[in-house]
Amino acid sequence: MKQLLWWGLLILPWFLLLFFDKNRIKRFFPVLLLSIVLNSILYQLAEKLNWFFVKENLPFLTDITPTVYGMFAVGTLLIFYFNYGKFWLYFIVNLLFDIFQSYVVTPFYGKLGLFERQEMNGFESLLIMTLMALIFYLYQKWQDTVMLKSE
């Protein structure tokens, strides 16, 4: 059951992208890649600083949950797809998703025995995700200026 959940959270979100405008998906794809890189770094820091621990994982992953490459990455892209250009809307929508992740999803993973918080509480997790959301937004603004200059 746990493996099925992890596989689903890795693969299924990518199918959502089939239903959206390809050009807009391409526009926001670099921020999706940045989210994967920053989250990978975050998970490596978490291991070293004992913030949290992935208890059960897919066979080819170590201390990074499959959500980094699936649900979180695609979710980041979709938040941009629907809210980019309206900063406060983006910020509020992202904050609501981050609150849900910190206080509902992560504890649920803990109850399933997939994930365990150690030295990081839900509020600290929320702060880091919010900071990352701001970094993503600034990156996309920069990306837009680079792309406009190159065209």
Image (cartoon, helix red, strand yellow):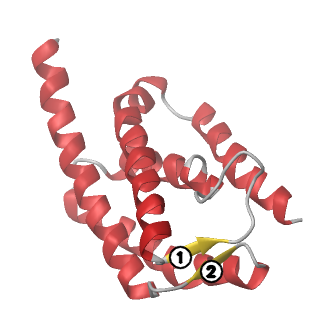
Residue 87 makes an appearance in the image: yes
Which of the two residues, 80 or 10, is positioned nearer the viewer here?
Answer: 10
Q: Quick one: quadrant of the N terminus?
A: bottom right
- Chain-order first, disc 2 or disc 1: 1
Q: In x, y percent, where is residue 132?
A: 31, 60
Q: In x, y percent, where is residue 52?
A: 53, 76
- Residue, disc 2: 116
User: Disc 2 residue type?
Assistant: Glu
Q: Is residue 59 left or right of residue 37?
A: right
User: Disc 1 residue type?
Assistant: Phe
Compared to residue 72, the image places residue 117 above or below, namely below
Compared to residue 88, the image places residue 62 above or below, namely above
Q: Is residue 53 left or right of residue 38?
A: right
Q: Is residue 147 left or right of residue 76?
A: left
| Picture residue at 83% right of the left edge, 58% below the top | 3
Q: Secondary structure at mark 2?
A: strand
Which of the two residues, 6 or 47, is positioned nearer the viewer here?
Answer: 47
Q: In x, y percent, where is residue 28?
A: 36, 36
| Picture residue at 38% right of the left edge, 86% below the top | 123
Residues at circles 2 and 1 in contact by the CB criterion of under 8 Å = yes
Crowding near the residue tagged with mark 2, few <14, some 14–19, many ≥20 C-alpha atoms within 10 Å: some
Residue 92 makes an appearance in the image: no
Residue at mark 2 to residue at mark 1: CA–CA distance? 6 Å
Crowding near the residue tagged with mark 1, few <14, some 14–19, many ≥20 C-alpha atoms within 10 Å: many
- Tag of residue 52: 1
| Picture residue at 41% right of the left edge, 64% below the top | 45
| Picture residue at 42% right of the left edge, 74% below the top | 49
Q: Secondary structure at mark 1?
A: strand
Which residue appears farthest toward the right when viewing the image? 1
